[in-house]
Amino acid sequence: SGMVMPNIGALIAFGFLAALFIDTGWIPNEKLNSMVSPMLTYLIPILIASTGGKMVGGDRGRVVGAIAVIGAIMSDTSITMLMAAMLMGPLAGFCIKKFDQLMDGHMPAGFEMLINNFSAGIIGMLLAILGYVVVGPVMSGILAVLAAGVNILVSHSLLPLVAIFIEPAKVLFLNNAINHGILSPLGIEQAKEMGSSIMFLLEANPGPGLGVLLAYCIFGKGSSKESAPGAVIIHFLGGIHEIYFPYILMNPALILAVMLGGASGVLTFSVLGAGLVAAASPGSIIAILAMTAKGKYFAVIAGVVVATVVSFLVSSVFVKRAAARDEEQDLDAAQAQMKNMKAEAKNQKVEVGQDDVAVAIDKEVAVSDIKKIIFACDAGMGSSAMGAARFKSRIKDLNLGIEVAAAPVDNVPADAQIIVTHESLAQRAEDKYDDKEIIEIKNFLKDD
């Protein structure tokens, strides 16, 4: 997600160009349509690879990552090398980082620029050759196998069954891996041939989660009922699907609701021929409608509505049953469990605290010196953005002159004095920023 999310704007730009100017678009234009294919074949993989390279190897990693992925792209320009970019970018960053570590203290004075430039060029060239000879063909083969599997599901009318795997995977925080790593590359290939693809709707459909949240709005109790309406807005309009995961963790039987809702939605999409021209990210109804192919609005909306209704009806049974048994539904505990699961899914350290009191790590900053506070998460666009907005509103009337913003934990602005991040990312931030005060919290939205 750290590689893909910062470049979603490029995917959206491609989506709009395709929706408007391809042969089956709203206003077909042969000259403007000529931008669509190069953007997909070259620009987006290079952006993703360069971002991955920078995450691992800094600015030099960014350059080498962009060079490296060209080899994979040119090995087969008939497919979009998104998966190759996700591999080549971090690999390039790792290689240049290790080279710099080996050369540290051994570089002759006056030759720094020469060695730095030539090392980046030579390592980039070697990785580009590796991409052309090995990585590109391997990724082409993997994509061919995945495409064949999808074709089997489609030809046997079994595509709705993918919801059985996708919906639980979302709650286990594998949604970005599935969506951007598997479904998007398949969808892009289908969209190139047919103008749109159902693959872009399989994970992004907000209907299953919306049904769960609506059930809590009507039949829930306590803090879960009070917080559900706000979660509906964040989920359905904002596209932050993570907001409904804790509600499922409170009552694990609800996984059946999202599975059945997701399957019903996919079945509706399939029967009515729904499709998007590009990935809708985040999974907001606004983004989905913006990426909907011409003439497919009814099919897309119908699939979302059906998924919502089915999920709501099934969720209502379990939510009402829990309320009838007078069970205490601890949203805070579920959110804490969700954060730990997310950290474990990313192989990050999980520390269980005794309370929600913020903990300061490393350098303490005088209040008078605080000019910028950064809320940091993996991509800097989801939970941290909501946390930053909430904190900004809390201090607005104090007129402190402090800027509050969100950023990826690996790319915090140099002029920030304080970083607020989830406890699972605190050690990562501490290792990277020894000149800033680190505040670790358990929940971006509900940590006093």
Image (spheres, rainbow, N blue to C red):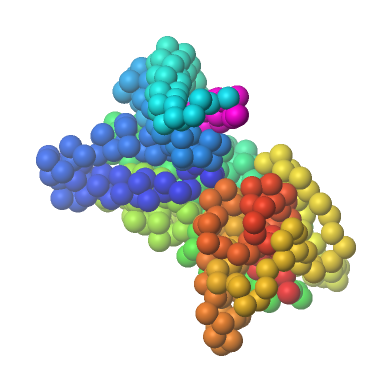
- Image point 52% across, 72% down: which residue? 403
Quarter that holds the C terminus = bottom right
Q: Which residue lies furthest to the bottom in this view?
A: 397
Quarter that holds the N terminus = top right
Q: Give the range drawn in magenta.
A: 92-105
As drawn, 198 above or below 429: above
Closer to us: 124 or 24? 124
**Residue 277: in sight, yes or no?**
yes
Closer to us: 422 or 61? 61
Judge whether residue 97 is colored magenta: yes
- Image point 53% across, 26% down: which residue? 107
What is the magenta segment's predominant secondary structure? helix
Badge count: 0
As drawn, 429 above or below 107: below
Residue 312 percent across, percent down from the top left: 61, 61
- Image point 64% across, 56% down: which residue? 435
Left or right: 426, with 121 as reference point: right
Residue 279 percent across, percent down from the top left: 41, 45
Q: Which residue lies furthest to the front in this view?
A: 109
As drawn, 276 above or below 106: below
Closer to us: 88 or 192? 88
Residue 134 percent across, percent down from the top left: 46, 13
Closer to us: 83 or 256? 83
- Image point 39% across, 39% down: which residue? 47
Left or right: 256, with 6 as reference point: right
As drawn, 347 above or below 122: below
